[in-house]
Image (spheres, coloured by chain):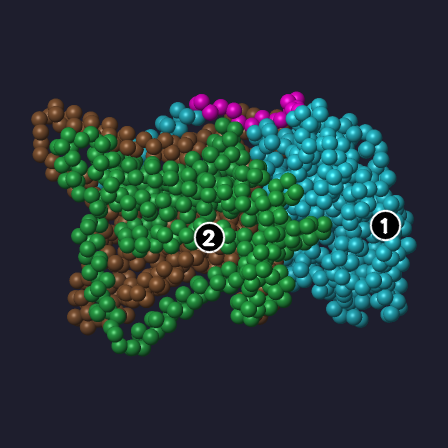
Chain colours: A green, B brown, C cyan
Amino acid sequence: MSDRALIREASIENQTHEIVGGRHWSPGRIARLATMSLVAAAFVFPILGFIAVAFRSDAGVASGAGGFLGLGDISISNVVSSWGQIMGFGGSENRGVFLQWMGNSLFVSVGGALLAVIAAIPAGYALARLRFRFRRSMLVVTLLTMVMPNTVLVIPLFLEVNAVGAVGQLWPVLLIMGFFPFGVYLSYIHFMTTMPPELVEAARIDGLGEVAIFFQVAAPISRQAIALVAFFAFVANWTNFFLPLALLTSNFNAKTVSIGIQDLIGSSPLFNPTTAAGLDVKLYMPELALATFVTMVPLLIVFIGAQRFLMRGQTVGAVKG
Amino acid sequence: MSSGTATRPLTARPTEQRKRTVGGRRRLLRRIETRGAWTLLAPYLVLLLIAGVIPICYAIYVSLQVTPTNLQPNLTGFGGGQAFVTALSDYRFFTTFANIFSVLIIWLPIMIIGIVGLALLVHSSPGRFGNAMRFIYYIPGALAGVANLMLWVYLLNPSQSPIGGFWHMLGFSTIKAVVATPGTLPAILTAMLFFQGIGTWVVIVNGGLNGIPEEIFEAASIDGANAWHLAWHIKLPLIRPWIGYAALMNLAYGFQLFLEPYLLDQVAGGALPDQYTPTQLGFWFAFSNGNFPAAAAMSLIVLVITLAIGLIIVFRSGLFGEEEK
Amino acid sequence: MKTRKLLSVTTAVATLAIAGLALSGCSGGTTSPSTGGNQTDSGGKITVWVDPPRVPAADAFKKAHPEVPINIVQIDGTVGGKTVQQQFAQFDAAKKGWPDAIFFPSNDDIAWATSAKSGYAADMTKAMPDTVAGYDPAVLAMCNIGGAIRCLRNDAAPDVFWYNAKFFKQYGYTVPTTWEEYATLGAQIAKEHPGYVSGFTGDAYAPDRYLWASDCPTNTTVTETKVLINLNDPKCVRAKDLLTTLTDAKALSTDGIFDADAAKVGPKMVMSPGAVWWGDYLFKQTWKIAKGTMTAVAPLTWKGESQPSTGDEGGGLWGLSSHIKGKELANAKVFMKFVVSDPAWQVELSTGLPAFKGAQDAWIAKQSASDYYADTATTFASFKPAISAVPGDHKYQLYNTGSVWTETVAPALVSGKSFGDAWTAFGTDLLNQAKSQGYTVVTSK
């Protein structure tokens, strides 16, 4: 899509308003608004109810107290006591291991996203604006790796990491997360649509080298692409389950929080009643929901932060890996 | 799919408008450009090697070996296709694929109808309301993975779920009964995947709709088409490439299902099959059976399937169609 | 422009292949069996892995032995879970990282921990002969692998016969002494008092409760790679008939004993074979059945046999690492000795009958004090003798009979299928599981 298309798109937003929508309350319009609102409600209420569980008490959840979505049962003291239980998880030696897991997740997710940006922005630029042999092949490889589900490679990745003896360490996970072909594609589309080839040509005539052109001409206009690559990479890394499961389960303190939650589930008398005996940390639904909610917070923050970049560039709405 | 290139040439060749220069100088410039390109690609290439090429090749290598298993500790060396025979002849091999199909057959149609329906609705509602709705639909997508699973544990547990009445009506009083009663799992997985996946796709297909020139809608309106006609006869055919793309991407996604059945089994007290999907079977080969070659073989089999789907997406969906001259 | 596309794909694939070939050349070794020859010594600090209910045991050790530096790691305690095995597969591949001692979350874990490939669990006959001598050999039968004791049991868990004494007295029923009487009476009670149950079939211990009790060959080791599975054996058929009778009469609950729902059905359980720990853990703590209701007698006998025969449900296993030596090994042994025999854990905190002989009487004395059972003296008198009524050639294998049961029989019965159908599915899956693990399956020794 060219920038002309982007401008055109903006004008659609204004014009279709009159053509399709209309201002009057026709039955079709009411039906449309009602359907959309209903679907939205079906999406929002479970999430609200679930978050509410994090603020409720064990007894309240078990007895179904609190009325609609249990909202009447929520209180700060519940959160405090649930959080105490979560922090107590890990036995006497590893109390508060949950925070460490959060830290590990932050480390690999942020590090992986950073690496993805560093690799994807110049690569996307090169694929979009430079001519070289195997350009098409590189593009095809990137598209293929992008559309293939990432768990397919996890067992081969485990074998590889195992061969270098780094299973149970965080850095291989970070490194692997840095490989983000979708980011390359985003960056490629970005330079295709926002950077006219003439700009590169002009810079060459000014005597700039190819790498210098990227840093002085292309990089300064790639804010949108950087934001999107970082956002998508972070979300993908944070929610990644299978890769940490294969690479990190063997090291209790090096887990990411996504697989750490599995440990919490495994210790919950709710699903594993044998653990109820003799256990001083009791993890029931409010504790599990609170732990999950805490893991959702970083996602919500980056999501709201990236919102304007996300919705502005329809170009990149085009594909998601 | 001729509309693909017409609506959206995402890929264009770099400009050919350069003036011809003297042959030698041109070759020199070319060389400089090539060198620059590979320099800029270098970090990505390194990562591609580490996280893509090497593991695949190493998996091929491993799949051709035999390693000691729990019961046969003295096996080593070259195994030919033994690992593939082990994987293919495992009694669960075809079952896992049948399971995937039983999920896909429910999930894909619902997903596609949902995506198209919501995207068309959002597109017919420009302005603040439509944008707000699109945002809301996207929220569950940001809570993928374990968070989505925990959310569903909450929804599926009859004793605490806001839809507990529904489960009791069906005769389920425990989460184990909900999840492990034969036949419910594909429907539950469908619901989970739909909830988590739909928003992203609505944004994507909506982006596709926004790329259609408004003159088309104008012309149709003048001809007397109402909103319904517009959606059904004009918009739908135009977004066919995106629908195909969504269908194929979700199809490929289906083959790598792991987290949901894996953790649901734990939640249901082990009442679900441990190896419900191909990925779980590969995982079992690696970590329960200790048979890394068979695990590698299993990965490669799934890899080939998704690679085939990927090739179709890249070359046949029309979305990545190269602008040929 | 098909040819160009084709060309670019070919180039792409070729690039990958060449890079791969170049790389695979230098990446050589895969895993090889761990020989146990590379033992290490940390200089004293030990790492122990315990499931959540065993955390108090490790904490008690830390209190009693402040001189031993210890790292206590709490692991996923899911019975039948795969996490621990997965972690060990990674340690075996990396040849490092094993804990020095572990409480196995599932008893079946001892199968892979003693496999020739892993060889994790040390030979306790050599490592701690004195402690092994403190056990009744019958308790350690499942740890006896190829003639060597490879694990130590935390608690003994033989099944005794539990019944609701109040119910039996009120309606004048006679407590059965044979399995056949149990089946007949169960059917009769179900008919005369609908809603009352005589057992549970939904948990992973159910096959232990009925098939192991019948000495049905599901888990019999012939050689290390050969197992005996024969569900057509008369000893299996009699268990199948028993369960068919009870299921047809709707005398059994399809729940598992650990299910949340079982707490509602539990108080309506009139009788059942069940482990000695059912009394305290299940009846008293979980189902909260009133004092003076439940009571236990000696296990049932099969018709035509002179001795009672009973199953065994759990009774956790401790393993010691074979990969350590020196001070680390010495400290790990101190830990092992403590958790299996020290009253500070086994008597004061543990809910199960200690497997270690020396701790049993003190535990019984302590548990008897609350006088919870209808006939406390008879109940506790039945516990120790039940140990020797457990058929000894049932060994834990790499396939998990309990999981096969919960994945086949339990859902089939829940959805209303006949026990015969469930049994067929169980048999098929059991054979498949055993074969997929690489076992040769024979139907007779």
On screen, A58 above or below C29?
below
Q: Which residue lies at the image location 78% right of the left edge and 51% below the top edge?
A: C277
Asked whether residue A128 is drawn in magenta, I would say no
Residue C93 in which image quadrant: top right
Instruction: Locate residue A36 relative to residue A260 in the image: left or right.
Output: left
Q: Which residue lies at the image location 77% right of the left edge and 58% below the top edge?
A: C283
Q: Where does label 2 land, which residue? A: A297
x and y percentages locating residue B91 in the rendered image: 57, 44
Q: Which residue lies at the image location 87% right of the left edge and 61% below the top edge?
A: C374
Q: Which residue lies at the image location 83% right of the left edge and 30% below the top edge?
A: C130
Q: Looking at the image, do the residues carrying marks 2 and 1 touch, with CB atoms under 8 Å apart? A: no
Q: CA distance from mark 2 to mark 1?
A: 49 Å
Q: Is disc 1 surrounded by few (<14), some (14 to 19) or many (20+) residues within 10 Å?
A: few
Magenta residues span C25-41
> Which one is in front, C267 or B308?
C267
Under circle 2, the secondary element is helix
Under circle 1, the secondary element is helix
x and y percentages locating residue B287 in the rendered image: 57, 38
Q: Are callouts 2 and 1 both on one chain?
A: no
Note whether residue B287 is visible. no
x and y percentages locating residue B313 in the rendered image: 33, 47
Residue B158 in which image quadrant: bottom right
> Which one is in front, C2 or C77?
C77
Q: Amino acid at mark 1?
A: Lys
